[in-house]
Structures are given as structure tokens and as C-alpha cells.
Amino acid sequence: MARLPVTEEELIELYGPHLNEAPPGGWDADVEIDKVVKTHCCFCGQQCGIKLKVHDNAVVGFEPWYEFPFNEGKLCPKGVKRYLQGNHPDRLMHPMERDETAPGGFRRISWDQALDRVVSEIKRIQAAYGDDSFAMLSGVSITNEKSYLVGKFARLALHTANLDYNGRYCMVSAGVGNKKALGIDRASNSWADIPLADVVWVAGTNIAETFPITTSYIWRARDRGAKLIAQDPRIVPLARTADLYLPVRPGTDSALFGAVLHELIRRDLLDHDFIEQHTLHFDEAAAAVADMTPAWASDITGVPAARIEEAAEIWGTAATGMLLHARGIEQHTKGVDNVLAAINLGLATGKFGKPGCGVTTITGQGNGQGGREHGHKCNQLPGNRDITNPEHRKVVAEAWGCDESEIPGAGVPAVEMIEQIHAGRIKGLLSICFNPLVSSPDANFTREALDKLEFYAVIDFFLSETGQHANIVLPGSLQEEDEGTTTSGEGRIIKINAAVEPPGEARRDWEILLDIAQRLGKGHYFPYENTEQIFEELCRASTGSSADYTGATWKRIEDEFGLFWPVPEVGHPGTPRLYEGGKFNFPDGRARFHGVPFKPSADVVDDEYPILLTSGRVVSQYLSGTQTRRIAALVKQYPEPLCEMHPRLAESLGIADGDIVVVTSRRGSMKVPAHVVNTIRPDTVFIPYHWAGKQSVNQLTIRAVDPYSQMPEFKVAAVRVEKATGHTSIEDTRDMELKEGAS
Ligand SMILES: Nc1nc2c(c(=O)[nH]1)N[C@H]1C(S)=C(S)[C@@H](COP(=O)(O)OP(=O)(O)OC[C@H]3O[C@@H](n4cnc5c(=O)[nH]c(N)nc54)[C@H](O)[C@@H]3O)O[C@H]1N2
Ligand SMILES: Nc1nc2c(c(=O)[nH]1)N[C@H]1C(S)=C(S)[C@@H](COP(=O)(O)OP(=O)(O)OC[C@H]3O[C@@H](n4cnc5c(=O)[nH]c(N)nc54)[C@H](O)[C@@H]3O)O[C@H]1N2
Ligand code: SF4
Ligand SMILES: [Mo]
């Protein structure tokens, strides 16, 4: 095992001396608790219920919240330790302005100075280069209320078309696929359906590490005798217990799904009545897979033909079944194709709209579901409406009290936005809740882009790696410092309760946005006194849309442990399971099959770059790591990135476990210790992506995107791997300068 021994000294060297110093008064065990607040975990899309313990305006501990039905008190390591971040000494306490002469590169300024500068730069840049030259990037760790507000703020206060969000790297391929095939972008079921499935198929998701609480739902299905199929280039923990493991080569899932559909047709394991009554275009899907035999797919995917046939047999003969997928099949230039190919399998066998049946993406980010409904995306208005559709624009203009002509058109998606910054077309940027320098593909390019901005302001509670490039830093709020709602991966709208006030001069995110709008002379569009008023407007704006919150109220959400949208009218009970009775969200009620041809990935292996690199997560770290790299107990669990590789590959390259290796793609290079494990394909290496600078795997990834969703291809890059030469130690993996254009 390559994991390095981590001493206290090493931790301090890596992360500074203040890793989780106790707040004044000490941690939980020693202090009297002023109050206990029922709320939810700030991290992943499961949004587990948790009770936070508060003392003297600091969160000092937690208790399980057993009554909350989704997780019934269970939490993963991140949920258990989340309370430690709020008191971290890196917490931003006052606004700052870039000043190269000041220690750390920033000097403290007042809120008035900071906001005046932000507003004058917005005005200057827009006057000189046009409104769209000032862009905004947002994220979905923020609540529904704030997501809605950001959408309206960017369009009406900044008056820019160029708003996009970090879900562009997360949920968009699933979103486009869901809307194209089913008409609604939401998980097809509440998780209560998982235990009712006779087969659970997990494709491209490391559930035990990324959605740990979902594991218990799958165990319940297995207790009833359900079969488990796992499709992943790595034998992830859940796959180790699977009835059928499909060791798919990265980037080839649509070939595998296609061959399964081919087999379902060949063996006539289809639900003909369902196809006839509730779907369209089956013939197109069938024609596309006519030549996709298991033998053909085996060559492409590396999965033995017999296993592909067995998958078809298990899925096609089971009375009920759920297919759960996540970024492993979605973060590709054919992410949408993969999603459509997975949905085809559900439609062909009638596995929708019934207990224990569905094909469902597992939403990643905390509010990755709600945040993709309320107008955050570059081409979207609230209620998951289309910003280019005149009808949709009219409805939203009415809800916003503006003239339709005031709403700008579609802007550019995140990767293109970074490219436009690089090209000098976008000159100014405001970001909230996004750390694109760590999380975007091709990090060297992103860094160059950030340095070209004439003005950049960031709203965050820690100074992220991206924030270090800002001209103005505005200290915003942690999740537990504000009130609102999120929508979990199940589609359950839940209530986030404030436990503490923002410390020092930090302010709630939404108040900062309102203040900027006011100073831009657009305050009349944002007359809110609290976030509940924003929620009420959001619900009204969603009426009649494909993400309908009309009947939701904060009170009902709290009283009923959440509400599953659509809630199309007051008193409506909510909709845990979509598509009941085979009714899909199109005027004719029919789901759409899609013909999905197989396409290769953007980055191809050759003699120079012969190995496939894929990237993802480990259980103890969260996303770009801004938050979890500041929590000592989580850092200790997996302190730095490692490069997983199979013993056979390691041997052929003369690499032993723990050796420092150099991984080089056509875009960049990094040094990282090897972690030799027999749970990965021998043609593939895996590096988790939670670290910055020279430890960032995104130095290697490619900017190619899916043509429908503009999702970047995080899951496939061609690389070469070599043992580092000369005397190389772990320090070199931390110190190596970023290389530009390694090829
Ligand atoms: N601990 C932890 N949990 C998290 C997060 C976190 O950062 N840390 N983030 C949250 C968020 S925002 C997200 S999006 C989710 C992500 O959740 P997941 O999608 O489950 O996580 P990943 O590790 O990105 O990728 C999942 C799996 O895809 C596999 N994979 C790679 N390439 C391919 C391929 O071509 N085909 C197939 N079939 N599989 C492939 C990888 O081996 C990996 O095991 O996790 C959420 N939960
Ligand atoms: N190579 C590779 N790259 C990837 C992925 C991968 O699998 N491989 N996965 C992609 C995926 S799925 C995702 S979701 C993205 C995520 O990428 P990011 O969205 O960039 O990651 P986060 O760490 O969530 O960054 C959010 C920032 O917002 C701040 N923040 C969090 N909550 C709040 C809040 O309430 N208010 C304010 N003001 N700020 C807040 C945090 O401190 C942090 O600085 O990364 C993507 N990048
Ligand atoms: S599973 Fe997700 S929501 Fe639940 S405790 Fe872990 S990180 Fe938090
Ligand atoms: Mo994500």
C-alpha cells in the first residue's frame, strides 16, 4: 500500500499550523450546548439529515438525526467531520483587495470599498466592451433560493448572457439525456424504490465512496435476493460484492449498453406492450445496435462477450430493476449518448414508473438537483425553462416583473467561458461557489485564462486556489450560516436551517448579491427581506414548468421531512416516483428511444501516450478540496493524490508500490506516488482530483466537451506513465512547477 505515513509534523507542513484548532471554549465534549439545529449535510447530493450542536455562535459538534427518513441517522466520514470547517482560522472574515505588497498578496478593506470597486469595474468593463464581456460563474453547493437569485441577478442586475455553473462539470449530461428521452430532468424514483428492485445495475459510480448512504438501500435489495451488476474500470468496493462485474474500458459504455440492447432484442427479452403503448422511435434504437454484437462490443470494451450476454439475461428477465449511473458514464464527450443508451435499456424492458423500476442518475453536488432547475445554466431560465424559447421568456419576465427584452439570450457554457476569457473576449468575472482552477479540465490553460482577466471578484468563505487570482474577495456564508432549501438527489426538497451567524464581517451570500444589485441601480428587482420570500417567488416562477414547485412551502417541507417535486398545486402530496402508468413528460405522454452509435473518446491512445487516465473521488475528500482539505481527520485518511495502477502495468514499467511516477498527457505532467492495486484494468490508471497546483490531475485532462451538454471529458485522457528518474522524493510531487504543453 502506497499510503504515506502522515505525522502531525507532516500535516502541519502540508496544510499549515491551524488545522482544526478548537474554537474558543473547545469542542463538543467540553462545552455546554446552547442549541441543536436540525438541518442537512453541506456536502454531497444525498443531503443526509444531521443535527448540529451550537455553542457561542460556533458549530461545535453534531448528533445523528434518526427521524429523517433518507439516512435515518447514518452519516459518512465527511458528514461526521463537517462541523470542523466553520472554525478554521482560514475562514474569510473581511473583504480583501489584491495588493502584491501585502503579506499573502491581499489587504483588508471595508465592505463599502469592496462593493464600490466591484460595481465600478462591472460598469467600466461593460461600458468599454459590452454587457456580455462581464461574466458570472456559480455553483450548486448553494441553496435553491440562492441559485434562483443568481440566475435573476446575472440576467437583470449584471445584464449579461454569460452565466454558467459548476454543474456543467457534473449533472449536465444526465440532464440533457433525461430531458430528451423522458421529458423531466430528475431521478426517476425516490430511493425507496431501490430495495424493491430485483436487479440493481450500477454503471460508472463508486457508490460506497461517493454516495455511502445509498449502499444501505442496495443492501436492502440484496437482502431480498436482488442481483447486483457493477460496470466500472475499477473493482470499486461495491463491485467486489457484485454478481456480475463488467470491467469496462474507460470511454466505451455506449458500446456495452448497445450490445446489451442487441442481446435483449435477439433473445426477445423486450416488454412489447410497454414499447408500443408508452414509447416512440424503438426502431431507431434497434437499427443502431443491429451490428453491436457482444463479440464486437467485447473488442471495444474489454468485457468478455459472455458477461455482456449475462447482463442482458439478468436485466431482461428480472421483473423489476434499477440502473443507477453517475459521472463514470456521464463525464465524456459522449456523456449524453451513454445516458440515452442506459435509458434505452429501461424503456426496452418496461422498467419505468413501477415500484422497484427506474433508470436514474445519482446527483453529485449538495444541491446538484435543485441548482439545475432554477435558472443557473447559460441557456436556462427558472423551472428548467429554455432561455431561447419566446413562451418561456414571457412567463419568466412576468414572474420577474421585467420586460421580456431585458432578459439576455443564451450565454456560453463553463469551458467555453474559460476559453473566451483566455481569448480576451470576456474581461470581467464574478464567481460564487466554484473553484474552476482545480475543477476545470486543462488546469494550465485555466490558470492562463484567469491571469488575463481585467477584473475578477469572488464570493467564498475560504480563499480557494481560484480566489487567489481575484482582485476583490468578498467573504460569504457557510451553509450553516443561512436559511433556505435544497433538493436532494432523490428530488426531495428539504430545509436547510441556519445554526450560526456569519462570523466577523462575513455576510450571507444573498445579501452580498442584493447589495451589488442595489449599487448597480437594479435593487427594485430584488425586494426580498429574507430568503423565504425568494422561495415563494421561485415557486410561482416554476408553475407549469417541468420542475414544478408550486405547492411547496417551507412549512410543509419541514413538517413532511421534505417534498418530492413536481408539486404542481397547493395541497399536492408530491411525486416520489415519476412516470407512473407509463406517462412521460411530453405532450403525447411517450418516452423517446434514441439511436446511439458508438463514438471513440476525444483523446486517443497511441505509442507515445498508451495508457488511459481516468479521475474521480475518494471517500474522505470533497470536490476541489477547499473545504475537506481543511479538516484534519479527513486529510489523514487520504492526505495526497495517488496513481492507482494494476501490478501488471506497474511491472511492465518497472514501477513498485510507493515509487514516484511521472504521468504525462498531451497537455501537462505531474509527479505522484504509485498505488499498485489489482482492482483496476491494466490499461488504465486512476488519480483522484481533490488537490490543487502540482497535485491537480486536471493538469492532464482535456478540454473536449460533449456536443449536447458541453460536459468536459474528465473520465478519459491518454497518458504515459514513467518511473521518476534520479533522486525523487514525495517533496517533488508537491514542488514541481506546472509544465505548459508537455508534448
Ligand atoms: N467522497 C466524495 N463523495 C462525493 C463527492 C466527492 O468529491 N467526494 N462528490 C459528489 C459529486 S459532486 C459527484 S459528481 C459524485 C460523483 O460520484 P461518482 O460518479 O460515483 O464518482 P467518481 O469517482 O467521479 O466516478 C465514479 C466511477 O467512475 C469510474 N469510471 C471512470 N471512467 C469510467 C468509464 O468510462 N465508464 C465507467 N462505467 N466508469 C468509469 C471510476 O473508476 C469511478 O469508480 O460524488 C458525490 N459524492
Ligand atoms: N478531473 C476531474 N475533475 C473534475 C471532476 C472529476 O471527476 N475529475 N468532477 C467534476 C465535478 S462532478 C464537479 S461537481 C466539479 C466541482 O468543482 P467545484 O465546484 O469547483 O468544487 P467545489 O469544491 O465544490 O468548489 C466550490 C467552491 O465554493 C465554495 N463554497 C461551497 N459552499 C459555498 C456556499 O454556500 N457559499 C459560497 N459563497 N461558497 C461556497 C467552496 O469553498 C469552494 O471554494 O469538479 C469537476 N472536476
Ligand atoms: S453521504 Fe453525502 S450528505 Fe451524507 S454525510 Fe456523506 S457527504 Fe454528507
Ligand atoms: Mo459533481
Image: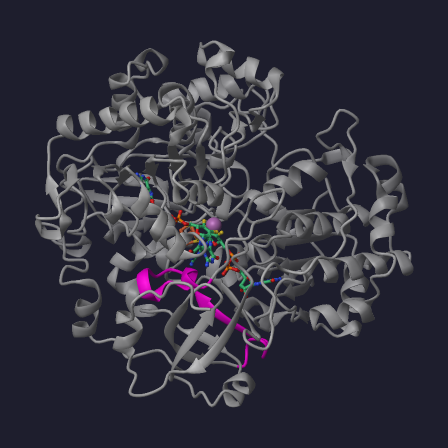
Left or right: 711 in relation to 742: right
Tell whether position 687 is magenta: yes
| Picture layout, residue 719 above or below residue 452 | below
Left or right: 313 in relation to 455: right
Left or right: 639 in relation to 229: left
Tell whether position 417 is magenta: no
Q: Measured from the top left, where is residue 312 in percent x and y?
A: 80, 62
Q: Measured from the top left, where is residue 618 in percent x and y?
A: 43, 64
Magenta segment boundaries in residue numbering:
678-700
Going 13% across and 52% down the picture, which residue do you hit? Answer: 104
Q: Measured from the top left, where is residue 666 in percent x and y?
A: 49, 66
- Between 213 and 550, the one lying in front of the other is 550
Going 88% across and 45% down the picture, which residue do you hit? Answer: 283
Going 42% across and 28% down the picture, which residue do you hit? Answer: 132
- Residue 67 visible: no
Going 36% across and 56% down the picture, which residue do you hit? Answer: 78
| Picture layout, residue 60 above or below residue 379 | below
| Picture layout, residue 647 above or below residue 485 | below
Q: How is this picture coloured? A: one colour
